[in-house]
Image (spheres, grey):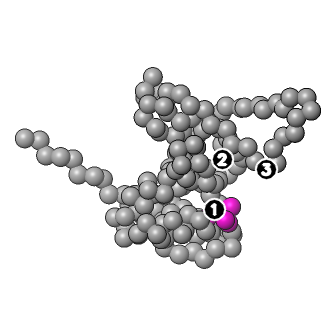
C-alpha cells in the first residue's frame, strides 16, 4: 500500500526578501510585524490572486490564525500594497501590487468555468467604449473573463 504524500510545508521568506518586505511595509506607513511580513511574502510568491482561505492555509504551519491573516490583508489593502477583487463568486481575492507592468494597474482575470481557478491576464488589453451619450461609471472598472483555463481545455 502506497503511503499518502505529506503536504509540503512552506518556508518563511528568505532573509533578503524579508528585508525588502519590511522596507515596503514601512514605506507604506505600516509597522513591520511578523504576520504582515508573512502575508506580504505569501502574496509576493503567488502568481495568481489568492483568497483569504488560501493564504490562511499556507501560513497555518507558521502559527498564524485566520483572523490575524484577515486583519493584515485589510491593512495591506488600505495601505495600497495589495488589491482586493471579487470575481463574482463572493470570494475576495488578493494580489500584490507589483512594480512590473502586470500589476501596477487594473488588469483582467480569467475565471475557469470548470475548475474555478483564477489567473491574471496582464498581456490582454480590454477596451470599453461607451455608446454615444452614455456616461462612464465613476471609479475603477474590473474586467473578468470566464472560460476554460489551459489545464481544462
Which of the two labelled residues, at mark 1 and mark 3, occupies the earlier sequence position?
1
Give the label on residue 103, or none. 2
**Residue placed furthest toward the left:** 1
Q: Which residue is mark 3?
A: 139
- The location of residue 7, given as percent across then percent down, is 28, 52
Q: Pointer 2: residues within 10 angstroms few (<14), some, or many (20+)?
A: some
Q: Give me the residue at 48% from left, 57% from top.
A: 52
- The location of residue 28, given as percent across then percent down, is 68, 68
Return the residue nearer the eye: 71 or 63: 71
Which of the two labelled residues, at mark 1 and mark 2, occupies the earlier sequence position?
1
What range is drawn magenta here? 76-80
Return the residue nearer the eye: 139 or 72: 139
Is 153 located above or below residue 100 in the figure? above
Q: Give me the residue at 53% from left, 75% from top.
A: 33
State whether residue 16 appears in this view: no
- The location of residue 145, given as percent across then percent down, is 60, 32
Q: Which residue is mark 1?
A: 77
Query: How many numbered marks appear?
Result: 3
Quadrant placement of the C terminus: top left
Amino acid at each position: 500500500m502506497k503511503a499518502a504524500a505529506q503536504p509540503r510545508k512552506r518556508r518563511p521568506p528568505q532573509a533578503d526578501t524579508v528585508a525588502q518586505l519590511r522596507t515596503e511595509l514601512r514605506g507604506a506607513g505600516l509597522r513591520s510585524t511578523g504576520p504582515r511580513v508573512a502575508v506580504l511574502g505569501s502574496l509576493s510568491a503567488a502568481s495568481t490572486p489568492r483568497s483569504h482561505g488560501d493564504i490562511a492555509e499556507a501560513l497555518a504551519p507558521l502559527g498564524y490564525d485566520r483572523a490575524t491573516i484577515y486583519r493584515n490583508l485589510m491593512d495591506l489593502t488600505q495601505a495600497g500594497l495589495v488589491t482586493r477583487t471579487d470575481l463574482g463568486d463572493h470570494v475576495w481575492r488578493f494580489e500584490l501590487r507589483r512594480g512590473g507592468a502586470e500589476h501596477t494597474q487594473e488588469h483582467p482575470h480569467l475565471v475557469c468555468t470548470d475548475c474555478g481557478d483564477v489567473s491574471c491576464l496582464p498581456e490582454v488589453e480590454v477596451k470599453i467604449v461607451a455608446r454615444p451619450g452614455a456616461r462612464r461609471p465613476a471609479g475603477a472598472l474590473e474586467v473578468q473573463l470566464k472560460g476554460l483555463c489551459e489545464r481544462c481545455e
